[in-house]
Image (spheres, grey):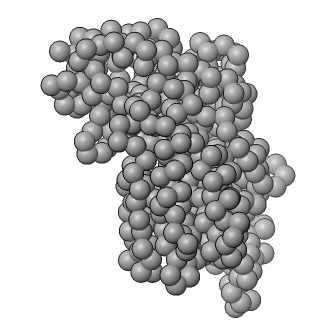
Amino acid sequence: MDHPLNRRALLGAGMLAGVAACTSTAAPAPAKPAPGRFDPSDWASVRAQFTLDPAYGQFAAFVLAPAPAPVRETIRAHRDALDADPEYTPPGSGEPDQRVREAAARYLGGEPAGIALTDSTTMGLGLLYSGIRLRPGQDVLTTEHDFLATHEGLRLLAERTGAKVRRVRLYDDPAGASEDRMVSAIKEGLGPRTRVVAITWVHSSTGVRLPVRAIADMLAEANKGRDERDRALLCVDGVHGFGAMASGVADLGCDFLASGTHKWLFGPRGTGIVWGSDWDMIAPIVPSFSRAASAAWQSGEASVASTAELVTPGGYKAFEHRWAMSQAFGFMTAIGKDRVQQRTQELATRLKAGLAPIPHITLATPAAPELSAGLVCCSVAGMQPLEAVRRLHEQKVIASVTPYNPSLLRFGTSIVTSPEQVDLAIKAVQSLK
């Protein structure tokens, strides 16, 4: 969306004219200062930007992430301004949604025109798999390990189109997963008319990180002999890699990447993005409030080609959250994407090394950093994961449970976690007998 449609625009004589005008430019209320001077090179200073209770080891911050001070204050400023003037838009050049796209593109390494704005990973995947243009006889390939958002999105696609959806198994023991087997499993699962390959960057069930680049390279070879309209598209649920790993879309080599920004990126709740290399492959599902959609509606003509803007769902949003996404990208960029990945994986490696020797613990996450990210999953002999979470909380360690069957105990090491908290978690897990 280029500009939120306001009441004057919707009720006035010209909707398009109203989209470009009729907005307040009053400056937002002054933001409260961050808790101490923010030094992105100091991990203690980074953690100080969050209001998390420091008495607890924070290993579930990625579930519905807390926001750092710059994001919180930007949300507050926009919220106060909207409460004072319902037709407020942020001051400055350009449209607020476009500025969000530009910030996301800088972070991802793509172009702003390639980014649709959503509310979550689930919404992004729904837009992709509901809108993908399939021809008769084309099929879809995914894996047994993907989350509900992918499996259900593809099931609904199959119900609407009749397309066959097949699943492959990438590993039997996640701790022993290998790049070669994962790539080979997807290659062997391809059919001559496979149009969509739907995978997840980091499995929330086990912490296994897929070799997305290697899969993309394999698909590039498979696509060489195909008609362009039968080319297999690599679609990635990126939520547990996005913000934790440094890779951009060029590094991954995928065709589409969907992610919420309210997890490892620590962005505003209820926000997300989808990046795409060619949006003409996706039909819009929800009417857009973009300029192009408005112009087509005014003229009575249908839009000619799909774009990320046209696929971005219209309607009134929690704009104070959407417009604060830029600060989340800026916060992580200030720290440094490479430093964030290194920190995340160093802490995860420390945690895995401490848990591995404990007799009653079985790790599910690969030890190799190249096959994992910030999630560390395990089982506790003789204890259900929910009971383990409760017992750990009593020892001031906050963990989570994987939403799968069977479920596992899950930890997430991130920029709000310290080495001392990792050691605390290892000691607490040792007591789970």
Task: Residue lying at the far bottom in this picture: please name it.
Answer: 300
Residue 336 vertical position relative to residue 148 in the rendered view, above or below:
above
- In-image side of 63 versus 262 (left or right): left
Q: As rendered, which of 1 and 279 lies closer to the eye?
A: 279
Q: Looking at the figure, which quarter contains the C terminus? A: top left
Residue in the picture at 68% in, 59% down: 221
Residue 309 vertical position relative to residue 432 in the rendered view, above or below:
below
Residue in the picture at 43% in, 15% down: 353
- In-image side of 109 versus 276 (left or right): right
Q: As rendered, which of 77 and 171 lies closer to the eye?
A: 171
Residue 220 vertical position relative to residue 351 in the rendered view, above or below:
below
Residue 106 appears in view: yes
Q: Horizontal and vertical percent for residue 226?
A: 67, 72
Q: As rendered, which of 375 and 230 lies closer to the eye?
A: 230
Residue in the picture at 56% in, 82% down: 135
Q: Horizontal and vertical percent for residue 145?
A: 39, 49
Residue 4 vertical position relative to residue 111 in the rendered view, above or below:
below
Q: Horizontal and vertical percent for residue 142?
A: 45, 59
Q: Looking at the figure, which quarter contains the N terminus? A: bottom right
Residue 108 appears in view: no
How many callouts does the rendering have? 0
Q: Horizontal and vertical percent for residue 218?
A: 63, 54
- In-image side of 116 versus 93 (left or right): left
Task: Residue lying at the far right in this picture: please name it.
Answer: 93
Snapshot quadrant of residue 400: top left
Residue in the picture at 62% in, 74% down: 230
